[in-house]
Amino acid sequence: MQLTGILQIRSYEKAKEFLNEEHVGRVASIDENGFPQIIPMNFVFLNDAVYMHSHVKGEKLDNISRNNKVGFEADRELEFLPSYFEDPHNASLADTLYISVVIKGIGTFVTDRVEKTLALNGLMEKYQPEGFYDPIKSDMRVLDAVTVIKITPESLHGKYKIGQHMSPEDRLELAEKIFQRNSSSAHETLKIMGFEITDNGLKMIDEPKW
């Protein structure tokens, strides 16, 4: 079976939703020797672009100044599927359920104070949704103390593997194994897979289509 197309996230809204939920992304730039540099960063996805804040000096800033073509990705491992789910004697059958989004784009430094303020407030709203802070204003000196990196996507692709490539019967069987194994992520994984935990066991409430 060719899985490539089946695993593709086709809904841009779902990809945005995923990016808005993830707390760590990775930005890739090219250093002065031509090697890729990959750094984990906090980020926010606003107005169809990725925004990150940084110190005013650093290697990644130098890299982007030389070559503004950058990569960005965020991913989430939902559930490791041990090989014994399929065969207790064949370790090669171990698998993983996951979601990922990969962006290729143009990196720039935001100089417009209104846009910079929007990005920094967006980061605060994402990472501190409970509030208890004063929103940043465009006339504050703090804007001069940080760099805001913007990645404008040239392409955005996502993949997800949550059992959508399986028959309903096989997906239910997998869900029951995940439920019985009861890892720390099992309940959230089952929800994303479209299952509800009831007093009578698992109930399929949604088709996993992204």
Image: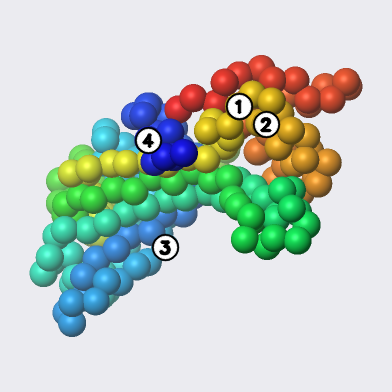
As drawn, the residue found furthest toward the bottom would be 33
> Residue visible at 16% across and 52% down?
106
As drawn, the residue found furthest toward the right would be 199
Q: Nearer the viewer, mark 3 or mark 1?
A: 1
Q: Nearer the viewer, mark 3 or mark 4?
A: 4
Q: How far from the left and from the top, in percent, is residue 66?
A: 11, 69
User: Between residues 19 and 170, which one lies in front from this camera angle?
Assistant: 170
Residue topped by disc 3: 40
| Residue 21 relative to residue 82: left or right | left
Distance in Å between CA atoms under marks 3 and 1: 36 Å
Secondary structure under the numbered disc 1 in the rendered image: loop
User: Between residues 77 and 130, which one lies in front from this camera angle?
Assistant: 77
Q: Are marks 2 and 1 in contact (CB under 8 Å)?
A: yes
Q: How far from the left and from the top, in percent, is residue 2?
A: 42, 40
Of the residues shown, which amino acid type is indicated by label 3?
Answer: Pro
| Residue 62 relative to residue 159: left or right | left
Of the residues shown, which amino acid type is indicated by label 2?
Answer: Asp
Quadrant position of residue 208: top right
> Residue visible at 16% across and 58% down?
69
Q: Earlier in the sequence, mark 4 or mark 1?
A: 4
What label does residue 5 carry, if any? Answer: 4
